[in-house]
Amino acid sequence: MNAPEDPAAQQGPWDRTAMVTGSRTGVRWRRVYRDQARWERLDPAAAVFTRWVDGHLMRPHPDLGRDGPVCPFVRTGVVHELVWAGLATGGDGLDTADLRRIVDDALEEYHDLCVENPDQARQLALVTLFPGLTRYERIDAAHSARKSDAVRRGFMLGQFYPGCAVPGLWNREFRPLDSPVPMLVLRPMMSTDFPFLAGRADWLYAYFTHLAPDLPRRLRWAIADRMLVEGAAVADITALRAHAHDEQAQ
């Protein structure tokens, strides 16, 4: 897989504080809001992404089911330039194995960024865009294949693409993962992520490990086994929501 071309390269290199490169695939992730205009010149999908962040994620939506922006997490990332994004070119020429390798690189780079920036790790997000990809089932397959790897590290891996039907936490008819460009997103695990982890005991164990690390290991496993959700209820994200309107994600 070839690394995507950088039409802004003639303006000078992006240094380690503004760009990282995957060792397996050569995909480059850039600190988007360090130089938003330069990022948007890389590819039409790059500009679509920032318009979606600014015009949708950071704004309220009438169908969201609660007050505030669609994604409260992202505003801090934008303000403090902690949103990293990369362009994985190739469109439908990328198969599921390619996407898995890209996610492996993303996990490695995201982990390193969190270690290098411990005071900012709770606000860091790393986004991989797949411009031209229309086989969205490959996004789902890569997400399914690598979610456990992310969760064990204390991260969440989210799949976004046009028409993604995963329901919202506050309104099961709202589709928060419906995005104009297919992408896979890494962010830190939060207290509100219980509904996305309730279907597997090992995911719940990781949830308690990262959010309640002082609990004894055996107790974490016991709680995970007791709180495991099975069957059709696993898909009912909204019903599994455990927090109230006035409780913020931690």
Image: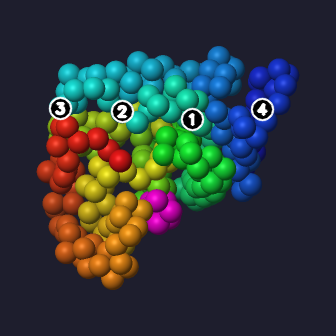
Give the mark nearer the N terminus: 3 vs 2: 3
Q: Main secondary structure of the magenta part?
A: helix
Which span is picked out in magenta? 146-154
Judged from the image, the secondary structure of the residue bearing numbered disc 4 is loop
Label 1, on which residue? 82
Residue 121 rendering spot, x and y as whole percentages: 54, 47
Label 2, on which residue? 72
Residue 233 rendering spot, x and y as whole percentages: 16, 60
Residue shown at the point (45%, 20%) measured from the top left: 54
Q: CA distance from mark 2 to mark 4?
A: 28 Å
Residue shown at the point (38%, 27%) measured from the top left: 57
- Mark closer to the observer (3, 2): 2
Give the mark nearer the N terminus: 4 vs 1: 4
Q: CA distance from mark 4 to mark 1?
A: 15 Å
Whether label 2 touches label 1, CB < 8 Å: no
Whether label 3 touches label 1, CB < 8 Å: no
Label 4, on which residue? 14
- Mark closer to the observer (2, 4): 2
Residue shown at the point (19%, 31%) measured from the top left: 66
Q: CA distance from mark 3 to mark 4?
A: 40 Å
Quarter of the figure with residue 207 = bottom left
Which amino acid type corresponds to the residue marked 3 in the rendered image?
A: Gly
Circle 4: is it few (<14), some (14-19), or many (20+) Cα within 10 Å?
A: few
Which residue is nearer to you in this view: 204 or 95? Answer: 204
Residue 71 rendering spot, x and y as whole percentages: 36, 33
Visible residue check, residue 242: yes
Give the mark nearer the N terminus: 3 vs 1: 3
Quarter of the figure with residue 44 = top right
Residue shown at the point (40%, 32%) measured from the top left: 179
Label 3, on which residue? 65
Left or right, residue 233 beside residue 85: left
